Amino acid sequence: MDKNKKKKDGVTDAASENTPVVVEKGLTVETESGVSVAREKLPDRTTQPVAAQSSAPSDYRRVTAEMHSDDGDASMSGGFASVKGTRRRENGLIWAVVAVMCVMCIAVGICSSVLTAYFMRKGNVPPHINTEDVSQQIAAVVAARKPSVAEVRGGSLRGSGVITKYENGKVYLLTNNHVIAGGSVSVRLGGEDSFYEADVVGYNSYYDIAVVTVAHTPERAVFDLDGSEYFKQAAEYSEGDHVVAIGNAMAMGVAAYDGIVSRSSDILKYNDKHVPVLRTTAAVNAGMSGGALFDMSGNFLGLTTYRMSSFPDGATHEPSNDVEDTAFVVPVSVVYPVYKQILGRGEPDSDMSLLGMTFFGATSTSAVGGMIFSELGITCEFRAGGLTVARVDSGIAPSEIAVGDVITKIGGVAVTGDVCTTAGEFLRYRPNVDTGANVPDAAQLRLEIKRGGALRDVVYKRIYRYVGA
């Protein structure tokens, strides 16, 4: 018999051309010509199994291994296959491991559920807002942040409040001072039917900011803006950014209004004072005082405090016309340090004193206006994107400061032409009038002054940093 054999498509060639090539199928065998014959009448297969060892048990089942290759190798090998049973002891070990893993998974699931329920009740980080789908951003912000805005009553006045945290059985809220000035204060949280009596933690009338608490366990989840990434002094925003204002509009319940940041830094004249504000086209209707302005990521940008209902003096207008799409917000750069100072040194029965700083509008030498620092002994104007010393009060200001100096840094933070950001940096400080002790060097107010091309530091030893980053 020819020892050279070829294999193709699972069919074994015969030893000679006269031997039919066959393929097994069921109980019969078909030749390549399609003729089926009984298996016992077919010639022996040409595949030659490897000879079994003489010592192999006679009851082993013979297995023919047919090796296939692209080159059509003529060599084929055969052998024996046997299956060994798995020991019972090994099966038991596997089941034990599976049982332990199941118990661990159940324990982790129970712990996760308990911890989730606990933190939801305590007040945790507000929900993240998906900003990938632009068409759904506003709806997402409203859904995630509306529960953080509440209705506030101050006597006969109606306003709004922003929930900052839930701590030690109390809900803390930011609101406007003019909202709570009307008398006894009460709060109704979102999704609830009743108002609950509130206590005033502290307030500052100049910046129109107040903090109140409600000793009440919320019926729905309360989120902690305070301490989260969504409530920080250094929140960034630009003119043209989309925003959402949420508040108790017309005292008809909490509602939302969208718009843009129309001016990121401004000085507004309100009654007998000037205040730093952010201007927006989002509607701020009556009753929304103390509400919140959020950006499209859910960041808190400030308190919706002022609305313009008539033209300012000197403007050309018809008396019957109203102002549209113009509202003003106390920015978070100002709200944050005042809020922290109130929490740390709340004085509910008196106006909270801060670093003596007031503002004024545009002058003949400044299109923006400036700031008066009674405790620093200087008056400054915003000129050419910087803060320039316009007046020095002898006996109060250090001798190193002179008119015309430019303040370039406040405590190591660069000064820009943004009134709100600059005001916020100064509001981190307060006079050392409490203990009379010396203030550590690292906490003292340090101003970097530029005169000509030279830089120098001026230190106020009685003014110290009270609010951290």
Image: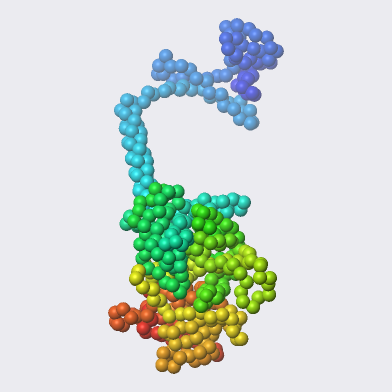
**Left of 239 or right of it: where is 127?**
left
The residue depicted at 57 percent of the width and 54 percent of the height is 138
Figure colour scheme: rainbow
Position of the N terminus by quadrant: top right
Q: Is residue 465 visible?
A: no
Total of numbered circles in the picture? 0
Q: Name the residue located 45 percent from the left edge and 64 percent from the top edge.
A: 179
State the image coordinates of residue 102 (x, y, percent, origin top left).
Answer: 35, 35
Task: Name the image quarter holding residue 312.
Answer: bottom right
Q: Is residue 438 left or right of residue 79?
A: left
**Residue 268 appears anywhere in the view:** yes
- Location of residue 60 (image quadrant): top left
Relative depth, front residue between 189 and 84: 189
Query: In the displayed structure, would residue 290 be above or below residue 112?
Result: below
Foreground: 151 or 445?
151
Left or right, residue 297 beside residue 21: left
Residue 89, compared with residue 231, is above or below; it is above
When the figure is inspected, residue 168 is found, relative to residue 318, above or below; the finding is above
Image spot of residue 329 (x, y percent): 53, 67
Question: Which residue is at a point 50% across and 53% down the rendered structure image?
Answer: 253
Q: Residue at x 60, y 9 (%)?
A: 28
Within the image, what quadrant is residue 350 found in?
bottom left
Left or right placement of residue 316 versus residue 332 in this view: right
Location of the C terminus by quadrant is bottom left
Query: Residue 40 in the image: x percent, y percent?
Result: 57, 6
Depth order, front residue of 180/216? 180
Residue farthest right in this picture: 33
Name the spot of residue 210 as percent of width and height, x first. Answer: 42, 67
Looking at the image, is 250 positioned above or below residue 8?
below
